[in-house]
Image (cartoon, rainbow, N blue to C red):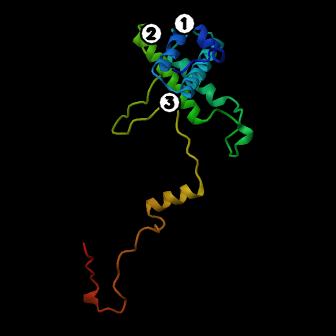
Amino acid sequence: MTEVRWRRFPLVAAHKHAHRWLQFPTHLGRAQNTVEAYGRALEDHLRFCGSVGVDPLQLRADVIAAWIGDLHERTNSRAANVLHLDSRVGLSNATIQQRIIAARSFYEYLVEHGLRERNPVRRGEPGCQGRPPKRGLVRPIERATRASAHRRRRCLGATPSPCRRPPPRAPDDAPPGSRTIRAPA
């Protein structure tokens, strides 16, 4: 069974409900890295709650939105190793998603145990007027590269695909009545 390294998560260890929640995945036999990631996420969330003076049992969705905004605005400690335009600010999209999922799971635990009425961490928003639903709280980051732009144009038919054959044509010197070509099925 995986053991929780409580010295890494002092706020989680001190919070009675967070402590019990983090023990839950260890009892399920989750991998050590998974438990560590959940612990880091919940430690971060509890630290933010303490900085704004809110009890996790009483907070509302606006505090969750402020926490997510804070995740986007933090300086990235590994920014010096990453070479693209927006690498100096904010955690990666995958890290933010992982932290949101851990917080959502923690609040689901609190709801199941009757400590909260509702989960403040929302899921995607439903679509309206025939539009597809919006997924998640964090918009995925799409980086436009030359290759992806070329693929997009090719899918739209602006450039011929190297995989598609052009439609069969009759030779230009064929008589007008024989220009109809029947392609085999």
Question: Could you tell whether 138 is left or right of 185 in the image?
Answer: right
Question: Could you tell whether 185 is left or right of 165 in the image?
Answer: left
**Which element carries disc 1, helix, strand or loop?**
helix
**Which element carries disc 2, helix, strand or loop?**
loop
The three-letter amino acid code for the residue at tag 2 is Arg
Q: Which mark is residue 100?
A: none
Using the rendered image of the protein, determine whether residue 120 is visible from the camera's viewpoint. Answer: no
For label 2, the crowd category at 10 Å Cα-Cα, with few meaning under 14, some 14 to 19 and many 20 or more, is: some
Residue drawn 51% across and 23% down? Answer: 102
Q: CA distance from mark 2 to mark 1?
A: 15 Å
For label 1, the crowd category at 10 Å Cα-Cα, with few meaning under 14, some 14 to 19 and many 20 or more, is: few
Q: Which mark is residue 16?
A: 1
The three-letter amino acid code for the residue at tag 3 is Leu
Dot 2 and dot 1 residues touching (CB under 8 Å): no
**Image position, residue 170 (x, y; %):** 33, 85
Instruction: Tell which circle, 3 or 1, labels the residue nearer the N-terminal end.
Output: 1
Outermost residue, right side: 80
Instruction: Tell which circle, 2 or 1, labels the residue nearer the N-terminal end.
Output: 1
**Image position, residue 132 (x, y; %):** 38, 39
**Image position, residue 1 (x, y; %):** 51, 20
**Image position, residue 118 (x, y; %):** 42, 14
Q: Which mark is residue 116?
A: 2
User: Is 109 in front, or is 3?
Assistant: 3
For label 3, the crowd category at 10 Å Cα-Cα, with few meaning under 14, some 14 to 19 and many 20 or more, is: some
State the image quarter where residue 89 is shown: top right
Question: Disc 3 designates what residue?
Answer: 137
In this rendering, the answer to whether 46 lies above or below 159 is above
Residue drawn 53% across and 19% down? Answer: 62
